């Protein structure tokens, strides 16, 4: 299970870096989103999945004897998902406004001044 998540993590980071290096604003945003999701998977992997050790209940209670994950990284990931959703929504609105003003999706067009601006 953890090996599969490591492979998914590598794919998310590789695809995110690839998309960030493209010249499109939409691909840049998608790359940043993939890097954020990869970081969430990394935090989940760092929490480790342990067998037979309940995260909150004392070990003297024999209620839970199954595979558990630490709840703290899961709460952190849930918070990160909510924050990244809000930031992504805001970035989409900004991208729409930039596209309406510049009429281009290319990042180089944002850095090139118009003749009337000189």
Image: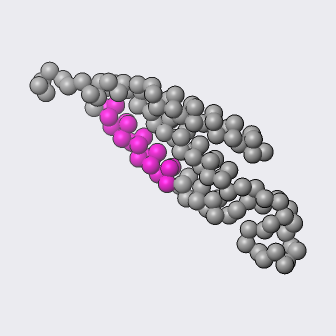
Q: Does residue 35 appear in this view?
A: yes
**Residue plotted at (78% across, 59% down):** 50
Residue 90 on the magenta span: yes
Q: Looking at the rendering, which quadrant does residue 13 occupy?
A: top right
Q: What scheme was used to colour the molecule?
A: one colour
Q: Position of residue 62 (x, y in %)?
A: 88, 74
Q: Nearer the viewer, residue 114 or 23?
A: 23
Which residue is more in the foreground, 105 or 48? 48
Seen in the picture, residue 88 relative to 77 is either above or below; the reply is above
Residue at 29 percent of width and 28 percent of height: 110
Query: Could you tell me what secondary structure mostly forms the magenta stretch?
Result: helix
- Give the left or right position of residue 68, taking residue 109 as reference: right
Q: Nearer the viewer, residue 37 or 3?
A: 3
Q: Quadrant of residue 8?
A: top right
Q: In percent of the image, x 67 and y 57: which residue is there? A: 47
Magenta region includes residue 52: no
Q: Residue 32 location, x and y as percent?
A: 48, 39
Q: In this rendering, would 76 be left or right of 94?
A: right
- Give the residues in magenta: 83-100
Could you tell me which residue is drawn at 13 percent across and 27 percent down? 117
Q: Give the percent coordinates (x, y) of residue 54.
A: 78, 68
Q: Quadrant of the N terminus?
A: top right
Q: Where is residue 53 drawn, in percent x and y?
A: 80, 66
């Amino acid at each position: 299970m953890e090996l599969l998540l490591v492979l998914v993590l590598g794919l998310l980071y590789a695809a995110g870096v690839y998309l960030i290096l493209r010249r499109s604003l939409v691909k840049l945003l998608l790359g940043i989103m993939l890097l954020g999701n990869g970081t969430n998977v990394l935090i989940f992997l760092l929490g480790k999945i342990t067998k037979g050790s309940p995260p909150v209940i004392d070990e003297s209670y024999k209620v839970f004897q199954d595979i558990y994950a630490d709840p703290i990284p899961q709460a952190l990931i849930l918070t990160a998902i909510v924050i990244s959703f809000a930031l992504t929504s805001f970035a989409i609105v900004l991208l729409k406004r930039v596209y309406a003003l510049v009429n281009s999706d290319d990042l180089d067009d944002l850095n090139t001044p118009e003749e009337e601006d000189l």
